Image (cartoon, helix red, strand yellow):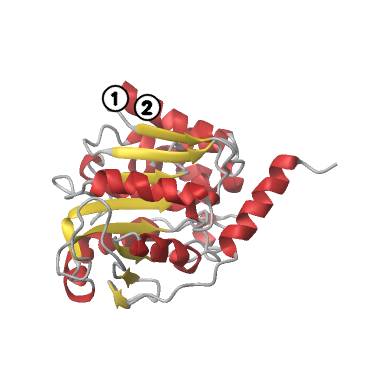
Amino acid sequence: MTDPAVERDAAEAASAFAHPPVAPDASAAYGDHPDHVVDFYAPRAAGGGAGADAGAPGTAPLVVLLHGGAWRAPYDRQHVSPLADFLARRGFAVASVEYRRGSSLPHQNAGGAVAGRWPETFDDVAAALDALPGLAAVHLPQADLRRTVLTGHSAGGHLALWAAARHVLPAGAPAGWRLPAPTVLRGVVALAPIADFEVAEELGVCGGASAQLLGGPVHWAERVPYADPAALLPTGIATTVVHGREDVVVPAAVAESYVAAAAKAGETVGLTLLDGVGHFPLIDPAADACAVVAEEISQLAW
């Protein structure tokens, strides 16, 4: 007997991945590795909140998009390029960030698909965000950097939350990660994020990807304080989590635990739970959930 939840997830994934990749308007390197690249999508039309000329310099909010895929190498930014284009057609300037993902690294001592690289995955996200203002000034002049919103899906949602929390990283964080003050952001919209590593591991999310990202269970205790968004609270940055109630890839319990941890830390994090929605409609331009994502970003950006 087939599981209806699994069947629904497969159908939603097939729909999300059926869209052909959308080429960016420009791309730029932020480092020397082939994965050190940002794709830029210029706004196609005026945004609903301001009515400004989307083609004029500095008039469009900037959405920084971090893709998911369990931090694993087979999944790159191409699969969220339709989402980047969808947001650009909503009047946003979009920067889609690539970063180094997992492979069978000997020091991780793990078989099969390994999630992420320590410290390279985090090195890359930090470096990309630090380089982005200068790159956007050249390649995406329409972007208003004062109205920057971070968003990301699944593992990318984790990275968006982490990037917004760099100013609260504990002392002793690897070089280049910690910032002395918060980044200039309007906020974060995290889409089905792997936002609480403890709960994610308890639920076996993505085959133990969180532990793999940290280099394996042997490194869990020493590294989780520098990587787990639920341990990096409060941030003082407006944050909203959007999650499907029917998500079987990253269950909504992960988001609910993160929101509870934020409340315990004295911070309010918005949580939008979508009925009848699983993991992939949030990045599927053909799904109603994607319009909800755009609206959540608009509420912070405009």
What residue occupies the far right of the structure in this picture? Answer: 1
Residue at x 57%, y 59% (from the top left corner): 16
Q: For the N terminus, give its image quadrant.
A: top right
Q: Mark 2–mark 1 contact, CB under 8 Å?
A: yes
Instruction: Give whichever of 235, 152 is nearer the camera.
Output: 152
Residue under the point 35% across and 34% down: 231
Crowd around label 1: few <14 · some 14–19 · many ≥20 (10 Å): some
Q: Residue 133 sits in which quadrant?
A: bottom left
Q: Is 63 on the left-hand or right-hand side of 58?
A: right
Three-letter code for the amino acid on which mark 2 is drawn: Ala
Instruction: Where is residue 150? Give x, y as percent.
Output: 30, 51
Name the residue tied to disc 2: 261
Residue at mark 2 to residue at mark 1: CA–CA distance: 6 Å
Left or right, residue 21 beside residue 60: right
Q: Which mark is residue 276?
A: none
Q: Is residue 288 left or right of residue 95?
A: right
Residue 176 at x, y percent in the picture = 23, 56
- Decide which of 16, 54 is in the foreground and name it: 54
Q: Which residue is mark 1?
A: 265
- Mark 2 Cα within 10 Å, few/some/many (few <14, many 20+)? many
> Residue 19 is drawn in which quadrant?
bottom right
Against 3, residue 72 (above or below) is below
Residue at disc 2, secondary structure:
helix
- Residue 159 lies, in percent from the top left, at 37, 51
Q: Residue at x 40, y 52 (%)?
A: 152
Q: How many marks?
A: 2
Say what secondary structure mark 1 lies in: loop
* Residue 154 visible in the snapshot: no
Q: Amino acid at mark 1?
A: Ala
Q: Position of residue 68 (x, y in %)?
A: 47, 56
Question: Taking 41 as reference, is 137 left or right?
Answer: left
Q: Tell me the residue at 18%/75% (across/down).
A: 138
